[in-house]
Image (cartoon, rainbow, N blue to C red):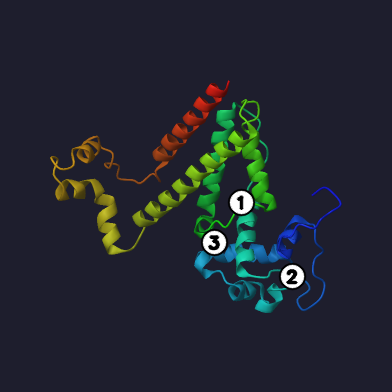
Amino acid sequence: MSGDDTETGLPASFELAWGVRDRPTKGPKRGLSLEQIIEAAIDVANAEGIGGVSMGRVARELGASAMSLYRYLASKEELLALMIDGAFGQLDVAEDGEGSWRVRLERWAEFELSAYRRFPWVLRIPVTGAPIMPHQLRFLERGLRTLGGTGLAEQDKLSAVLLVTSFTRSFAMLSGDITAAFESDDPTTARVMPRYGELIRKLTTRAEYPALHAVIDAGTFDDEEFDGLEHDFRFGLERVLDGIEALINRRA
């Protein structure tokens, strides 16, 4: 961070993550660091889901007391925000300047989808505001740079990136839930998901649901192996990019 004034008004843990606040030096467990706490919390979330994360559980993972964590964090909510940033920090968000704006923005969206699939618990943390943490802002910066030279106004660039990330996040949540349903041990789910097209044929008539039966007749649900909705992601992302391209052409 540049400038002499480092007063941000952010929580102390956020300032510590940005490197504009000194690390705590007093109290027990001096060998502990904010980075260790975040890493341990991510390990717990990866193993047990976001529901398994608590200050006490993370402290046990570190062999420390819950109170020792409060020297670095004021609340669980701060920890969750730092975990999201820590997850993105474990991925390579290096600048990718190859290709057209469309190719680079597509790769940006693919990167975000891969992050959600590696850390699916991120999607279960409510969005409480605009990104303000270092790794998240670095990721946003990369997205905005993909639209450099397009002639779009700066506000339009931000809106376009927001549109892409909104689609990617929504798709990641939906596809994750459907994937979990296919892999579920629940007997009801196991009876429905693999035989979805077959069940629709049995439960509905062509006269009542002609459009749905046309989709079934086209073999949409015939694949025996679930592919994670990859085609649907490509289709949706391409349509979003088509819209942005139309805007760029109109502005030009």
Marks 1 and 3, how far apart at CA: 24 Å
Residue at the spot of label 2: 32
Residue 157 image point, x, y percent: 60, 35
Q: Tag 2, which secondary structure? A: loop
Q: Which numbered disc, 3 or 2, marks the residue that appears first in the sequence?
A: 2
Mark 1 vs mark 3, foreground winner is 1
3 on left or right of 110: right
Camera-side residue of 36 and 6: 6
Marks 3 and 2, how far apart at CA: 21 Å
Q: Amino acid at mark 2?
A: Leu
Q: Tag 1, which secondary structure? A: loop
Residue at the spot of label 1: 130
Q: Give the number of the disc on residue 46.
A: 3
Q: Amino acid at mark 1?
A: Ala
Q: Residues within 10 Å of mark 2 (few under 14, many from 20)?
A: some
Q: Amino acid at mark 3?
A: Asn
Name the outermost residue toward the right. 4
Task: Give the quarter of the figure containing the C terminus.
Answer: top right
Residue 238 image point, x, y percent: 46, 32
Marks 1 and 2, how far apart at CA: 29 Å
Camera-side residue of 68 and 251: 251
Q: Residues within 10 Å of mark 1 (few under 14, many from 20)?
A: few
